[in-house]
Amino acid sequence: MLKFLTQHRDVALSGIKGFKNQPLTPKLFGLMAEYTTKSKIAHANPWRKTGAPTAGFPIEFLLAFDIFPIHPEAYACYAGSAGVTRSAIEQAESMGYSRDLCSYMKTSIGATELGWPCDFGGVPKPDLYTSANMVCDTHVKWMENEARRRHAPYFGLDVPSHVAGSGEEELERDIDYLVAQFSDLVTFLEKHTGKKFSEEKFMRIIAKSQEACRLYDEILQYRRSLPAPQYFEYQRLFMLPVAVMWNLDGCIRYYRKTLEEIRKRFGPISPAASGEREKYRLIWEGITIWYKVDLYYWLAERGARFVYEQYTESFAIRRRQTTTFNETLRQIARELLLLPYTLNLEKRIANFERKIDEYDIDGVVLHANLSCRPAAAAQQDVKAAIQKSRSIPVLILSADMNDPRSYAEGPVRTRFESFIEMMEARRAGKEAAKS
């Protein structure tokens, strides 16, 4: 870190300023700092194995072999939050990576090539790489290519798409397919760690991840309250402990304490008002814009707060408790196939309509993420369906999750001002109809 501070002083100072602008509580900041510290320690210890998984990969398999998860996307998010991604992305592009490829990937590769620490997006060389492709096909080639470049073993889970029209029979077939791959994964990890797989240890870890996800999900449910206890600018950081699972005991303690505080303030989960309702309650669809937390602050000044996102909900991936090993494997496979963030169009629209009603939503923002084109597919269909069935404004916002070159402050704010005017006009119309 000292070498980085010396050689990249401008980046370091800009990054520190960016981190300070985040809505971090001392405890959450401490957990994030703990993760980077433990990543560096694990990498420095030759007797401790490390692995680089992608989002959605079942990290519990790595933990069962005492493999510490060094998560490239998490570090890319750190760099995005710090607002220092541009030079890392341009470094990756100078290496031949295209402008229209994933900015998480380019942040990670560029920062690593520049020798930046993980606090700023770099990735210490792991002992192995793993990916799962249900969130993003880029994950496969990203991890595969990095494994080749850095001479490390790689394992990829192939997760089929549960497309519209697929029934329970197709789902069970796909679950069988994934469970067979879990067996291959265990063999791969045994080979590269020299350890034997323990079902008992794995089930203890699963029980902890299920409890962490249960607590996290209950906290998310409280965002139906009026007003919500947490908003997107904080929630996008709050999900990190459950997303990366580097310290499940610490994660459970943190979420349990947070939930106790929320219960004390709001009582049982209920949409009934416990305080003044937000002027505009919004849904954000897609990955956040990491480098632009100021946008969320600016919207908050105008009474617009994001109270639900499929993006943050999807990280509570262990959604049902299990008791036996075989049942657990099948449930993990089912969760990978039916992740909220990757629902087919039919189920996606139905989920939006349900959440609009549950969370008393005034408007929806669909992030047409230039780094994640598949996730932004069919947004015009989603917009048309929501406007028809719920008659609320929907804004499609073109930007990029980690590349500030794709964000224009003036046009974005102009579009949001018009969006707010539409919500205000809808409200005025409803009040006029009542009178």
Image (spheres, rainbow, N blue to C red):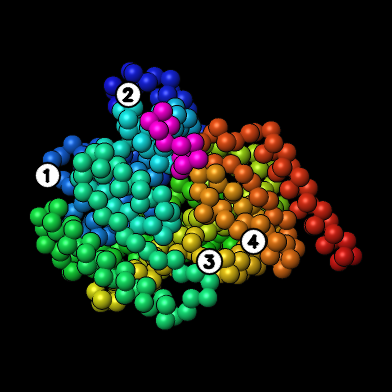
Image coordinates for residue 274, horizontal then vertical, percent:
62, 61
Q: Which residue is mark 2?
A: 4
Q: Which mark is residue 47?
A: 1
Distance from the alpha carbon under mark 1 to that under mark 3: 43 Å
Q: Which residue is mark 4?
A: 382
Quarter occupied by the N terminus: top left
Asked if the residues shown at circle 4 and circle 1 are in contact, with their CB atoms under 8 angstroms apart, the answer is no
Q: Sequence order check: which comes first, mark 4 or mark 3?
A: 3
Dot 4: within a 10 Å radius of its alpha carbon, few (fewer than 14), some, or many (20 or more) residues? some
Q: Sequence order check: which comes first, mark 4 or mark 2?
A: 2
Q: Quadrant of residue 84?
A: top left
Q: Sequence order check: which comes first, mark 4 or mark 1?
A: 1
Start-end of magenta stretch = 92-103
Which residue is farthest bottom?
169
Left or right for 338, reference 277: left
Decide which of 20, 342 is in the foreground and name it. Answer: 342
Left or right for 235, reference 275: left
Q: Which residue is mark 3?
A: 344
